[in-house]
Amino acid sequence: MNVNAHFHVSLGECPVATSIAYKKWGDLGHPLVLCVHGLSRNATDFDELAQALAGQYCVVCIDLPGRGQSDWLSNASLYTNRTYLRVLEELIAHLGVHAVHWVGTSLGGLLGLQMAARHPQLVRSLVLNDVGAELDGGELQRLRDQAATPVEFEDLREAALYFRATLGGFGKLDVARWEALARSSVAADVRGRLCSRFDVRAVPPEPVTSRVYLWSIWNAVACPVLILRGEHSRLLSRAVCMRMEHEHADARWLEIPGTGHAPLFVDERTIGPIGMFLHRAMRLAHYQDALQG
């Protein structure tokens, strides 16, 4: 069973603290798995994964500022990775834990990379979902342009069709899952029309004109890493995944058939490998703690 909760964080010079929403599955006495979504998405993308893991872990799925049930920021210039990392650090402190296993899709994976490089004792393992140390700039710009377009819908059916068309990289989901995804991604405005629960001002304004290289950050990551790549992804190439695996002491990559950017965690093809990876990472973390103790 999940619990919907909020905490508050002060950002910039705003006198009013921003309310940040998250969903918690399982007992905080278990190892914590922190799930962080992509640019325009929200915490509900991890519902099936959280349900599957909640017996062994406490799974916390955040809505970043400007997404889902979290507040939108009055100052659009605060929509930066620096802000998101501060919010995530505040969430971890709020939960009262000292280490997490991180699962990040797209933007959430990039934040995980930065957090693991910055705080190696905090991130005990890392799952990168269709994101890595080198990204195709043209595809990244296309995804940003798509997210930056405001949308509204007459009804839930129209919203589900839109998300099915624009988020086809998630994989072959059934009608009920697309409708559930749409339901969690929109809210009614004062006119009764459905609008996205995403502040389009959160899309970075700077254009991406070339490939994005993050190898220096990747080289600073020491924890175990599982890289998931959508079979048809145009953002993350097989060559980059292989190089990441080769250059890291404990990284492996796996391709998810029938998906693009980015696989949604809804079935055994994705949930199973993550469960096995986390089980191994948790044992390694236990051994390391015993040695240090």
Image (cartoon, grey):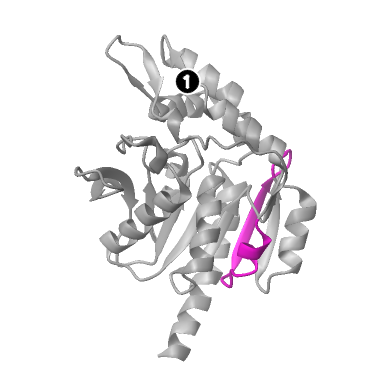
At horizontal 53% and vertical 29% (from top left) the residue drawn is 147
Name the foreground residue: 162 vs 88. Answer: 88
Kind of residue indicated by mark 1:
Pro
Residue 216: say if magenta.
yes
**Residue 55 horizontal side relative to residue 141, left or right:** left
Instruction: Decide: is 246 above or below 143.
Output: below
At horizontal 36% and vertical 11% (from top left) the residue drawn is 193
* Residue 54 appears anywhere in the view: no
Name the foreground residue: 234 vs 55. Answer: 234
* Residue 129 appears anywhere in the view: yes
Measuring from the top left, give residue 159's x and y in whole percent.
47, 18
At horizontal 39% and vertical 48% (from top left) the residue drawn is 61
**Residue 142 horizontal side relative to residue 47, left or right:** right
Q: Quadrant of residue 141?
A: top right
Return the residue at label 1.
150
Measuring from the top left, give residue 41's x and y in whole percent.
47, 36
- Give the quadrant of the C terminus: bottom left
Specify the segment rendered in magenta: 214-235
> How many residues crowd around disc 1 within 10 Å: few (fewer than 14), some, or many (20 or more)?
few
Residue 213: say if magenta.
no
Measuring from the top left, give residue 121's x and y in whole percent.
45, 74
Measuring from the top left, give residue 213's x and y in whole percent.
69, 54
Name the foreground residue: 123 vs 265. Answer: 123
